[in-house]
Amino acid sequence: MLTADEIGLMAKGTIRGEVIDFDDAAGTGWLGVSGTDNKIFFHCTQLLDGTRQIETGCQVYSQIVFGHTGKFEAANIVKCDY
């Protein structure tokens, strides 16, 4: 669960994280937020490369938004290039 301080920091810009779980059939997964023990839900439609699939362990940049389900989720997910 994110604290108010963490949400405030994330609202100021892009975060870095790692895909810790992804279900191809459902198109949903979880990002681990770098430097914290937090995880954030995401849907494959938020992958900006258009593939709708991503590998577990992939490093990404993302924004945190208030989702349509009333919870925070990752949006505008981009794979890190390095």
Image (tube, grey):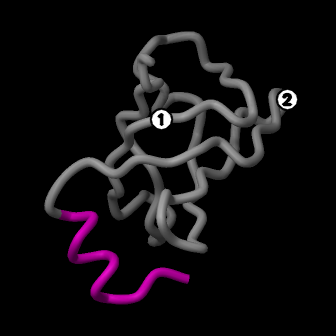
Percent across and percent down for residue 76 are 35, 35
* Labelled disc at residue 21: none
Residue 21 lies in the magenta-colored region: no
As shown in the figure, which amino acid type bears the numbered disc 1? Val
Residue 7 lies in the magenta-colored region: yes
Question: In the figure, is residue 73 to the left or right of 20?
Answer: left
Q: Is residue 33 above or below residue 60?
A: below
Percent across and percent down for residue 55 are 72, 25
Q: Which residue is mark 1?
A: 60
Q: Which residue is mark 2?
A: 25
Crowdedness near tag 1: few (<14), some (14–19) or many (≥20) residues, C-alpha within 10 Å: many
- Decide which of tag 2 and tag 1 comes sooner along the chain: 2
Q: Which residues are magenta?
A: 1-11
Question: In the figure, is residue 22 to the left or right of 32?
Answer: right
As shown in the figure, which amino acid type bears the numbered disc 2? Ala
Percent across and percent down for residue 71 are 48, 70
